[in-house]
Image (tube, rainbow, N blue to C red):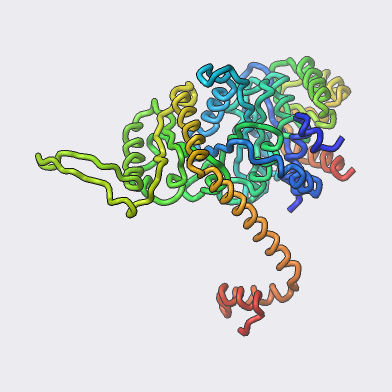
Amino acid sequence: MDLVASLLEGNRLSLARLITQVENRTSEGLAALSELFPSTGRAHLIGVTGAPGTGKSSLVNQLTLAYRQPMKETSGRRKDPLRVAIVAVDPTSPFTGGAILGDRVRMRDLAGDPGVFIRSMATRGSLGGLASATAAVVQILDAAGFDVILIETVGAGQAEVDIARLAHTTLVIEAPGLGDEIQAIKAGLLEVADILVVNKADHPGVEATERALRGMLQLAHPVPHIFHHHGKLERVGTPPVGQIDQCDWIPPILRTVATEGIGIPDLMDSIDRHSQYLRESGEWQRREAARLENELNNLLLEALMSRFRTSMQEAHYGSVLSEVLARQLSPWQAVEVLINGGNR
Amino acid sequence: MSERKIRILIAKPGLDGHDRGAKVVARALRDAGMEVIYTGLRQTPEMIAEAALQEDVDAVGLSILSGAHMALVPRIFELLRANGQGHVRIFLGGIVPDDDIPKLIEMGVSGVYGPGTLTEVIVHDLKNKISSELIG
């Protein structure tokens, strides 16, 4: 039977096989993607990112356990637990092309649950914290009917922010003792957080980490406050409306101890509130649009590049490259020559 | 771009905590350009088969030092077949008495690599067996 039909019937082997096809960009995989694309767009995509060793995999494990609990009666009647897929990305060695994908080690609690599907992916040379096929793999899982897809990035430093373009909700995981306040005001990873998590909150230094993050957030989202300064009451208001971005979502900062499950219910609440905010504010549609546009642009870039390279004679490219190596052409001039055939 | 990567699951069934060998093999396969899914200690046959399915691996490497290989290996084969993954190779490392090796090969184990095996041998065997299947 063909893989797509059997995937839609819930066959897990077909799902796994199809993911491999998509990762390897076989023609079968690409055809399946096109067939499945209309049934995507239903899952809540949650990104989990942060530096190596902050506890991303352990948190993903705990979040999945929480999603797999039957839903509370407060929402009316008891509903079935959500089905959860996990895409865990680890780096490919730039030297050998091999990879060790070790995120499952922290997810052993999830074994044996038919409502959970875990897939490890290697970056295969892509920078930015995800593999270039991650978006496509997420689409397959979405079409397969998972309600929540948790996407765990590689241990990310400062600029691996691709996840924010893919996920609806991005969690940035910090841990105590990783850097001072100046790290917190740099651009990059922290800016893309919808929710900030200080994991390992039982370790010393958690207050300092939280204070640095809070300080960073207050620069981005000023709130009026009153304080004593040399014995005088000082009043600091917010800038008038219009000078700052009107922003109705201020990222909450939450403390967790993922290995013990501490702080997980609050984190789940924040994720739910964020999802509600996205839907009510219209931000969900905006993010979907931005995500699909970004994916389209990436594919276009790649296709144009490969078409350009196949249309060009290798010798011509080689001769221009050697002029660059000889410092006779700058790389900018070389591009001009290659694209417009300009003079040198 | 459509290069086919070999994907291997390295698992350690049983209750002992000696995973040095499993890590050495995982690292050697990584250095040979394979994608190695490492699952860690104390895996049950059910957990191993489930991971092999979700990760769509070509082979499963088991590190067994407990002497339980004659029970674990048939069980894992059985679960893989039940999942439609009869094509997945199983290879073993750890402590396996010489007398058991022919029986394991008979069951379908593709190789038994005891202490002192050169990692190059394991890499070579896997590449040969798996790439011949991919072409065929």
A303 and B120: which is toward the camera: A303
- In the picture provided, is B76 more to the left or to the right than B27? right
Asked if residue A236 is positioned above or below residue A85 in the image, the reply reads below
**Quadrant of residue A236 within the rendered picture:** top left
x, y percent for residue A119: 66, 34
Task: Report the number of discs.
Answer: 0
Asked if residue A241 is positioned above or below residue A324 in the image, the reply reads above
A20 and A218: which is toward the camera: A218
**Quadrant of residue B88 within the rendered picture:** top right
- State the residue at coordinates (38%, 36%): A177
Asked if residue A293 is positioned above or below residue B16 in the image, the reply reads below
- State the residue at coordinates (47%, 37%): A277
A157 and A162: which is toward the camera: A162
- State the residue at coordinates (31%, 42%): A215
x, y percent for residue A137: 68, 41
A79 and A204: which is toward the camera: A79
- State the residue at coordinates (69%, 73%): A317
x, y percent for residue A10: 75, 29
For the N terminus of chain A, the quadrant is top right
Residue B66 visible: yes
x, y percent for residue A197: 43, 34
